[in-house]
Image: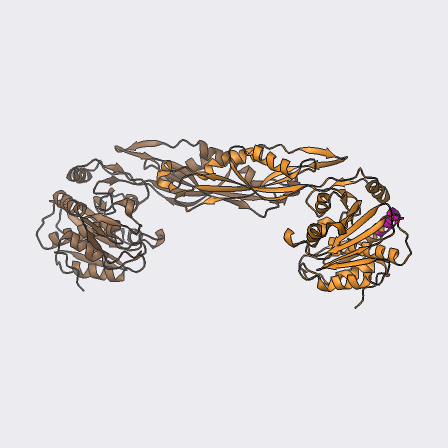
Chain colours: A orange, B brown
Amino acid sequence: MVLDLSQDVVALTAALVDVPSVSGDELVITELIEGALRAYPALDIVRDGNVIIARTDLARAQRVVLAGHTDTVPIADNVPSRLDDGWLHGCGSSDMKSGNAVFLRLAHLVGSGALDPAVDLTWVFYDCEEVAARRNGLGRIAREHPQLLAGDLAVLGEGTNGDIEGGCQGTLRAVITTAGTRAHSARSWLGVNAIHLAAPVLSRLAAYQAREVSVEGLTYREGLSAVAISGGVAGNVVPDECTITVNFRFAPDRSADDAVAHVREVFDGYDVEVVDLAPAARPGLDAPLAQALVAATGTEPRAKLGWTDVARFGELGIPAVNFGPGDPNVAHKPEECVAVEKISAAEATLIKFLS
Amino acid sequence: MVLDLSQDVVALTAALVDVPSVSGDELVITELIEGALRAYPALDIVRDGNVIIARTDLARAQRVVLAGHTDTVPIADNVPSRLDDGWLHGCGSSDMKSGNAVFLRLAHLVGSGALDPAVDLTWVFYDCEEVAARRNGLGRIAREHPQLLAGDLAVLGEGTNGDIEGGCQGTLRAVITTAGTRAHSARSWLGVNAIHLAAPVLSRLAAYQAREVSVEGLTYREGLSAVAISGGVAGNVVPDECTITVNFRFAPDRSADDAVAHVREVFDGYDVEVVDLAPAARPGLDAPLAQALVAATGTEPRAKLGWTDVARFGELGIPAVNFGPGDPNVAHKPEECVAVEKISAAEATLIKFLS
């Protein structure tokens, strides 16, 4: 089987959906993409595990990175794809094989000489985005070969309905523990109830006023949420421990360290252990290249709420945005689909941007 | 094997400890006790499952019930018994085979004519006290044959260090549930956090002022404790449910219904589901017979904190107290033991009381 990049972008999306690539099982799709890209002598190809990187070397002043993950969540009886009344259905259609199809079409246009881009281009197709962060292929390249990701703007093909979503929130998880003294509940005054001691922790959470902050013209809304609480030994025992796990989603004007300090301040006086921390990414929309991409879409950019791989570029100092034809509301659902007109429109937008 | 009730009460305790009788496995000890009691023609014997009831029929004006459970918690390498420097060690030595030995010695003295009691007597030896309440042998008799438990005072041989402990606390368990709306924690403002909603529930628990109340001369201290809390869906989800389990231990001046009403009042405005309820028992120390027992011990009676089977007699309208040579602090522990002088003293107290 050969992947034909000269076909229509919707047909190419369908072809990608028809190759199962659940996280951890990206070998076949990676080899198909590698084979297709190696057909263009103008592209330098690097294969690293199940990551494929293709680069032009046109000596342009600036370089744009187009990045997409090839994996999907588990298939839910929704492969192969199905085209129905302007919608392409199937696992990964929205998240994010339609974005990959757009990027691969650009590789064909540039590789075949049909499009002479104003910038150099790097394509990155990577594995294991839908699973634990430590397996993420883009993360591995960022750690081991960051020079391969160098550029002036990165575009991630995650579904944004064809709009630009800038930057991303940071996320911090912390466990707050209260410690008491066990006792039989028939003699509760002999103990110290750790669940009762958690009352002020929950009160602070309930009273917390989250910031809404503008960063480079985009509005980010923060949030501090309890995501778990647990305590109790037995039905007749005053418990000696209660743990509350909180998740702080923070705007890109805070560094990861600032976020930790803020959470420690909110829960001052309590035992706070940070168990997970991923930095936010600034939207980077003040860069001229990003402005040009925004202009090409013709719509207003939005802040990205949620953590995405743009933050990996942010950590390398590369402005990065999300831009893809998919619809995030149907991602990870059996009814996942994408509007075919959004796929074609995204291709047209990027052609316009790169010309 | 025959159980010899004519032997010294300490030796008899040791003999009982040496017969394993973990809850659910009381057949052997029940048959030994039954065989021993059937040797006395003056006693009417009823066997019902693994419950043995023996009764005198002396046409006395009043009747005292002596009740003890024959089961123990699981053996922890502490059977057979071991006598060491005034202490008898072994599983069930304190809880409550020493109490049973005292009661069986009285059966021997009365059955053999050595003691002419001032009251009629009923002995009840029952199974499955250490496990789920629905399996409790005394509870079954109280439901199915309450006339067999009739009397003017019941004495439970649970360990009290040889003092009188009157009545018992009631216990109520309730689950308080807060209901919110799930959302992604990156967009927490779209949800309602059920754990945050639990803040006032914990605040009320932390601020709760428990009563200390005198009932028939004994002081009971109440307590309202969270014994469990649980909530959370995933590390990135605003949870839609949080449950708090509370345990209310209440004094015998409250009925079970009063206790329910009180807990509902404390958590007014919240969803409160009562999941477990056992009434308190009044100490009954105003009854002349109980006064006589107190006088025989020569010590001050105390309130019983914790729920015990005296409440089952309380529900039948029979005053009931705990009185036994065991030490409640070593019950259920591998190092369980009982002071031999306490066993002999308890026997002497009951002989004095019944004479």
Q: Does the magenta-highlighted stretch encompass residue B108?
A: no
For the record, the magenta segment spans: A347-355
Left or right of residue B208: residue B297: left
Q: Is residue B1 visible?
A: yes
The reply, left or right, for residue A236 in relation to residue A62 is left
Question: Is any part of residue A84 visible from this angle?
Answer: no
Q: Residue at x 72, y 62 (%)?
A: A79
Q: Position of residue A272 (x, y in %)?
A: 53, 39
Q: Is residue B215 left or right of residue A125?
A: left
Task: Give the answer, above or below, for where B259 lies relative to B144.
Answer: above
Our reading of the magenta stretch's main secondary structure is helix
Seen as rendered, the residue at the extreme left is: B114
Give B62 or B5, whichever is nearer the viewer: B5
Image spot of residue B325 (x, y percent): 21, 46
Please say if B167 is above or below B115.
above
Q: Position of residue A94 (x, y in %)?
A: 75, 53
**Could you tell me which residue is drawn at 83 percent across and 44 percent down?**
A293
Across the whole image, how many numbered discs are drawn on residues? Answer: 0
Query: Could you say where residue A227 lies in the image, as x and y percent from the top left?
Result: 57, 43
The answer to which quarter of the image holds residue B163 is top left
Judging depth in this view, the residue of B29 and B11 nearest the camera is B11
Q: Is residue B168 left or right of residue A18?
A: left
Q: Nearer the viewer, residue B128 or B254?
A: B128
Q: Residue A352 in magenta?
A: yes
Looking at this rendering, what residue extends furthest in the bottom direction? Answer: A1
Instruction: Locate the N terminus of chain A and report the quarter of the image it occupies.
Output: bottom right
| Residue in front for this viewpoint, A214 or A184 | A214
User: Could you say which quadrant of the image residue A261 lies in?
Assistant: top right
